[in-house]
Amino acid sequence: MSPDALADLMSLEGVPSAYAAARDGVDVILRDRGLRRTSPETTVESLLRGAHASAVLEGSGSTLAQVRAGEGDEIAADAVRLSTELLALAPTLGRAPLQALARIHAVAGAGALDPERLGRPRDAESAVRLREVAAVLSAPTDAPALLVAALVHAELVTAAPFASHNGLVARAVERLLLVSRGVDEKSLIVPEAGHLALRAQYESNLRGYAEGGRAGAHAWVLYAAEAYTAAGEASPLRREAE
């Protein structure tokens, strides 16, 4: 993957309009639901919902109620722990993306892996893939932040560069990119829940992306635009407006 991949994806049929519509949908929710009046508790609730959804996608059997009560299984506990530290890493993701990726994995995998494996790529090939992701995160681009987040998400899931928790890491980075690039600075939409709501499509499109080729990448980014709309619908702001 190279930074040029973003320009290539934006040239594919339907992609520019899909991402313009997705961004408009997110902006409407954030603007019309009173973004400036939101409390830190709303962000905490969004992060909690996201942690639960990401954990379920990773194989957790815990319900949102169990996670809310601190009674989730080990995967859910890992996701919640990551959610509590995630937003503090937004500046690092922009300034030193490899460092941020390593830290995200170290937090997610704490307790599950030996300390020397935390934040470290599995092998030399994985190290190359992580550097490629970092290059995309560092390179100037005219591509929408949502598209960058979608591409990095798919790369991290399919490359599986760490010894564990790659799905949790990928979805955490996706959320963090939306914060750091100004799409959702208070982290109020729930991209993880958007993917969970569309789980069959999420998993099938990741498989298509992993197989390589232009068609698989095209299908993934079109799917992701739809998932960002679902992410907005999962925001706690929606409940507050009812």
Image (tube, grey):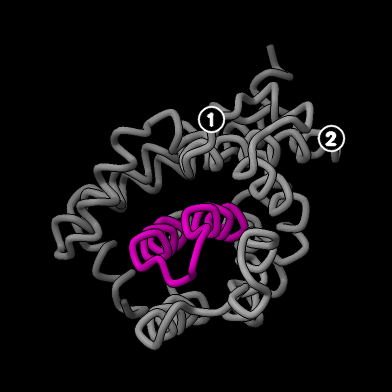
Q: Residue at x 44, y 74 (%)?
A: 141
- Say if residue 198 shows up in the picture: yes
Residue at far front of view: 114
Q: Is residue 129 left or right of residue 75?
A: left
| Label 1 crowd bin: few (<14), some (14–19), many (20+), radius 10 Å | some
Where residue 235 sits: x, y (%)? 62, 30
Q: Amino acid at mark 1?
A: Gly
Residue occupying the far top of the picture: 242
Quadrant location of the C terminus?
A: top right
Q: Callout 2, which amino acid?
A: Glu
Q: Quick check: 178 above or below 118?
A: above
Whole-number angstrom distance, CA of label 1 to CA of label 2 = 25 Å
SS category of the residue bearing label 2: helix
Total marks shown come to 2
Asked if residue 165 lies in the magenta stretch, the reply is yes
Q: Is residue 226 above or below residue 137?
A: above
Residue 175 percent location from the top left of the image: 58, 52
**Residue 93 visible:** no
Residue at 41%, 38% in the rendered image: 227
Residue at left offset 47%, top offset 40%:
59
Quarter where residue 152 is shown: bottom left
Residue 236 in the magenta stretch? The answer is no
Q: Earlier in the sequence, mark 1 or mark 2?
A: 2
Q: Position of residue 75 (x, y in %)?
A: 60, 44
Q: Which residue is mark 2?
A: 41
Q: Kindly identify which residue carries mark 1.
A: 61
In the image: residue 93, left or right of residue 71:
left
Q: Residues in magenta?
A: 148-177
| Nearer to us in this view, 25 or 105 | 105
Work out whether residue 112 or residue 170 is closer to the camera in this orientation and state it. 112
